[in-house]
Image (cartoon, rainbow, N blue to C red):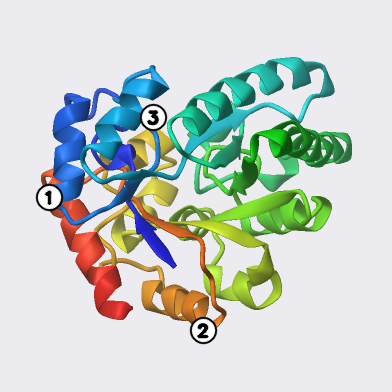
Amino acid sequence: MKISTAPCNWNNGDIPDFRPYTPYAQMMDEMVEAGYTATEWGPGMPDDPAVVRDETAKRGLEMVGAFVRLGYRDRDKWDEADAAALAVAERVKAAGGSILVAAELGDERRDAEAGHVDEANGLSDEQWRNLADGLSHLADLLEPMGMRVVLHNHVGTYVETAAETRRFLDETDPAKVGWCLDVGHLKYGGGDAMDFLPTYGDRVEHVHLKDVDPEVLRKAKAEQWSFGDALRGIIFPELGDGLVDIKGVVSWLQEHDYNGWVVLEQDTTHRAPKDAARINREYVQSIL
């Protein structure tokens, strides 16, 4: 497996007011100082892929992919989703990446219910078909570019809970749509990666590795926090300090010859972002 970092460790697009954004040059320098040789595209990076490619190359950083939220659940929104997806895919491809990490679009209600959703208010059967068909359609658009789409199970979206994540995996075509397993979001949404891997491990084509603070999660559920509230409360601690069986996940991936990217993410932290990123890398490498 290959280890990467991500700009969200420095600049979080979900709560941009959490701390002042770190300028991209400083952020990339700190990625290298924290021991990384690869990154996803993300908040705070320049819009021009040529600039991103030059800036990463001179620091020895490889570009992995980029995240985007897409609204394929409604058939009449496919053109809008295509435009958003292709804009990001073309930019990240030009910067050297090959993976489009897609999340279901979600909405304000789902964001407010993050971690304590009412599944009765989830997608209809028609919307599930639209989502699955839309992702396969996107895969066909990306294939000539040499890009691959992976769906990210994500709190605040309609692929959040264990049941919703299973339905996504069961409804989509494995030949076209991969799974970005985010172990932290899955735990936050009530699932567990170690329950999924024996059955769905072959669907994993990309991994976001983060942990979940049990006390923050308890408060988030009890007090009905939104996703933004939980991020401000530092729901994702340093790896190894929370509920997720990080060692178990990494060991399973190793034992099953996973050769994709493992992106070490911590959306918010009380520490300096560089220090948290270094701690997380050292923790994973101690397992490896």
Measuring 19% from the left and 56% from the top, which residue is drawn there?
35
How far apart are the two marked residues, 1 and 2, measured between alpha carbons?
30 Å
Identify residue type, mark 2. Glu
Q: Quadrant of residue 163?
A: bottom right
How far apart are the two marked residues, 1 and 3, measured between alpha carbons?
25 Å
Q: Quick one: label 3, few (<14), some, or many (20+) residues within 10 Å?
A: few
How far apart are the two marked residues, 3 and 2, measured between alpha carbons?
34 Å
Q: Earlier in the sequence, mark 3 or mark 2?
A: 3
Nearer to us in this view, 266 or 219: 266
- Judging by the rendered image, the residue that carries numbered circle 2 is 255
Q: Earlier in the sequence, mark 1 or mark 3?
A: 3
Percent across and percent down for residue 67 are 49, 36
Q: Nearer the viewer's eye, disc 3 or disc 2?
A: 2
Q: Quick one: label 1, few (<14), some, or many (20+) residues within 10 Å?
A: some
Nearer to us in this view, 29 or 185: 29
Above or below 102: residue 185: below
Q: Which element type, helix, strand or loop, lies under badge 2?
A: helix
Q: Nearer the viewer's eye, disc 1 or disc 3?
A: 1
Q: Are marks 3 and 2 in contact (CB under 8 Å)?
A: no
Nearer to us in this view, 36 or 20: 36
Percent across and percent down for residue 259 are 51, 67
Q: Are marks 1 and 3 in contact (CB under 8 Å)?
A: no
Measuring 54% from the left and 68% from the top, which residue is drawn there?
193
Percent across and percent down for residue 56 are 28, 36
- Judging by the rendered image, the residue that carries numbered circle 1 is 33
Q: Is residue 114 left or right of residue 172?
A: left
Q: Quick one: label 2, few (<14), some, or many (20+) residues within 10 Å?
A: few
Q: Which element type, helix, strand or loop, lies under badge 1?
A: helix
Residue 14 is marked as 3
Work out whether residue 109 can be spotted.
Answer: no
Measuring 64% from the left and 44% from the top, which residue is drawn there?
148
